[in-house]
Amino acid sequence: MRFPEYNQHDALGLAQLVRTGQISASELCEAAIERLLKVNPQTNAVVTHAFDRARSFAAQPLPDGPFAGVPFLLKDLGAPWAGVRLTGGSRFFEHYVPDVDATLVQRLRAAGLNFLGRTASPEFGLVPFTEPELHKPVCTPWKAGFIAGGSSGGSAAAVASGVVPMAHGGDGGGSIRMPASCCGLFGLKPSRGRTPIGPLISESWFGFVSEHAITRSVRDSAALLDATLGPEPTGLFSIEAPATSYLQACQQDPRPLRVGITALPHMPGTLHPDCRAALDDAAQLVESLGHTVEPIELGISKTEFANDFFASVAVALTAEIDLSSRLLGKTARSGDFEADTWVVNLIGRQTSARRFMNARQNLQALTRATTRHFEKIDVLLTPTLALPPPPIGSLRPHGFEGFMQKVIARLGLGVLLRVPGVVEKSVAEVFKFMPYTPLANVTGQPSMSVPLFWNGDGLPIGSMFTARLGDEATLFALAGQLERARPWTDKRPPIHADA
């Protein structure tokens, strides 16, 4: 294995080696490609290779950025990269090649990152596992056959298996934090408007989606956000710039914080004992560091929240499919999509304007109520997920439910979706794994999953911390303190490039 010290450094550490001439960007590029080719047959994390482009970039004069020459991967959803295929995990986009770079991609490139390719995503990022029919299912490097989470599961698996020190992710309902939890990594969803989403769109999922990265170290996430934050002319949302750099914030302990804790799911779901143990462990660690931890009741109506969030996503998907049809110049048909995607699309098409606006108003009221809780606390501590990473395939509809979903999708029997209880039952099933993460997407608050706990089966279980809108600095300061108190960056899963 060339450059065996590769995984002893985070992204900032590798950039420092390049900057001081201890290794070249080309050598780093080849080391990352070698690692990718070794472990990807086991994880299925990377679905598009761009090795020639990466080698060419490494051979040229590098941008003067904090990550000059560091190998990186883009998720196969969002963040268009001109000239490289972007499928969104869908057969409908199997041959789509964008001709423009996303604003975020431009900023990542200016930071010096060298893109090796794209990582797997479920179709349109809809589900919390990465098992697209277009590609092979992605597993967590901690246990073969178990999920890596979604929708940034490919990025998380690539980082955890030692291919790259960090990779791009997007989070519309937990899609950075869920795979970070499943793969034993650090994952922060920034505040709404903190990072750019354009220039081809002005918002995604009504502002639920924020893009950033999944990393091994806290400081890499902080420095990357420093390099990519800021508004863009075409974006609908912007937020006040931070008073200090996030890299500086994560290197200093925070003041004593008021931490509210709840184990109660925000949506229908039951907390697994291992996830409860992880939450209790995180609370004890936080208290030992001098912070105050007290129970808090958010008073959320679980079923109403789940149904309103799902209705919003369904309408967003329908609009996205219509926009995609115009972009590609072809009609969207059920056979171009996975059955569950098409069913959600049908639900979106049957959602009335009145129902949609009621959902939006309910979610805005939930945002106002949640914001008021943060007048009494600095940070909210919850589980990231309600379950440890389950086996691949276990979260998909099975039996009669799976059969009916396929029938509805393929035959277009949308009338069956109007039968009382059909949609509600499916919604409850969708969120039983992830009843905590969507809240921060609705409120726009920054939220992070921190890898502090592994269960008896050797599977990682994240703990989630959420702060006030715009207060990533507090999260980074707390994350840095937690990382120093209980380091995780040297942990290596069984599926790893150095194994």
Image (cartoon, helix red, strand yellow):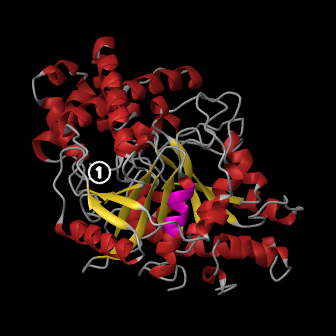
Residue 439 in the figure: left or right of residue 424: right
Q: Is residue 140 above or below residue 499?
A: above
Q: Residue placed at 71% from the left, 54% from the top?
A: 227
Whether residue 45 appears in this view of the structure is no
Q: Where is residue 16 in the image (x, y as percent from the top left)?
A: 77, 75
- x%, y% of residue 100? 72, 36
Q: Is residue 18 above or below residue 238?
A: below
Q: Which residue is drawn at 18% across and 24% down?
A: 417
Camera sees residue 182:
yes
Using the image, determine if residue 286 lies above or below residue 268: below
Residue in the picture at 11% in, 22% down: 419
Looking at this view, name the residue that lies furthest to the right: 61
Q: Nearer the viewer, residue 451 or 170?
A: 451
Q: Considering the whole magenta stretch, tell me its main secondary structure.
A: helix
Label 1 packing within 10 angstroms: few (<14), some (14-19), many (20+): many
Q: In this view, does 188 lie to the left or right of 11?
A: left
Kind of residue at disc 1: Met
The front one of 260 and 99 is: 260
Local SS, label 1: loop
- Give the extent of the magenta segment: 473-479
Q: In this view, does 367 lie above or below 491?
A: above
Marker count (numbered): 1
Q: Quadrant of the N terminus?
A: bottom right
Tag 1 residue? 434
Residue at 27%, 65% (x, y): give it.
388
Q: Quadrant of residue 373?
A: top left
- Residue 347: x %, y % from top left: 28, 24
Q: Of residues 94 and 452, which is closer to you in this image?
A: 452
Q: Quadrant of residue 117?
A: bottom right
Question: Residue 142: horizontal and vertical position, in percent?
Answer: 38, 75
Q: Does the magenta stretch include residue 308?
A: no
Residue 477 forms part of the magenta stretch: yes
